[in-house]
Image: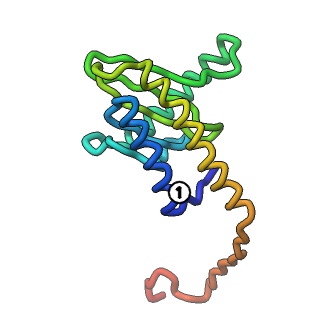
Amino acid sequence: MAFALSKTDVEKMNRVLQELLAQSEAVGCVVCDYSGYVLAQQGVDSQDPLLISALGAGVFSASRELAKLLGEDKFSAVFHQGERKSIFICAVNLDVLLVVIFTNEASVGLVKLYSGPATSTMRQILDEVQRRAATMEVPEHTFVLNLKDDVFGTGR
């Protein structure tokens, strides 16, 4: 699904992420769609948020397939623990993920605890974006290529 986010929408999402970072003691978070496109980010300046979101989306998609193999409808979250940093990925809705990066000084329990309300608020923001998109009228544009013209400037 494509999202038409306004500047206000992104600001709201960033406030939610800032609050999540403060409460959970995480070091960074990214909101992305299932293809890895970044919708909002906070605290991941030293890492590549696009790469984090793309790989996180891939990991989450793989976990969904694992869930099916195990007879589950879905897994709602994925957690990877490292020696210095860990990552928690959870579904915001059917199209969007929240990726939270935290160090070993932060508690996975705090990250999970505060990710719940953050995803709920994020879901409300995205629901409003979808409602707004459904009511917008998009003018139909037609593109016609006149083959008699020299489109590429080859001089023929």
Q: Where on the picture, by quarter, is residue 25? A: top left
Q: Position of residue 74 (x, y in %)?
A: 65, 22
Q: Position of residue 61 (x, y in %)?
A: 56, 29
Position of 26 with respect to 93 (left or right) is: left
> Going 71% across and 56% down the picture, which residue do you hit?
131
SS assignment at label 1: helix
> Going 59% across and 37% down the picture, which residue do you hit?
120
* On screen, residue 139 above or below 85: below
> Going 44% across and 48% down the picture, which residue do you hit?
15
Residue with the mark numbered 1: 9
Q: Nearer the viewer, residue 114 or 66?
A: 114
Tell me which amino acid carries mark 1: Asp
Q: How busy is the neighbourhood of tag 1: few (under 14 within 10 Å), some, or many (20 plus)? A: some
Query: How many numbered marks appear?
Result: 1
Position of 60 with respect to 138 (left or right) is: left
Position of 83 with respect to 50 (left or right) is: left
* On screen, residue 108 above or below 94: above
Position of 116 with respect to 140 (left or right) is: left
* On screen, residue 131 above or below 88: below
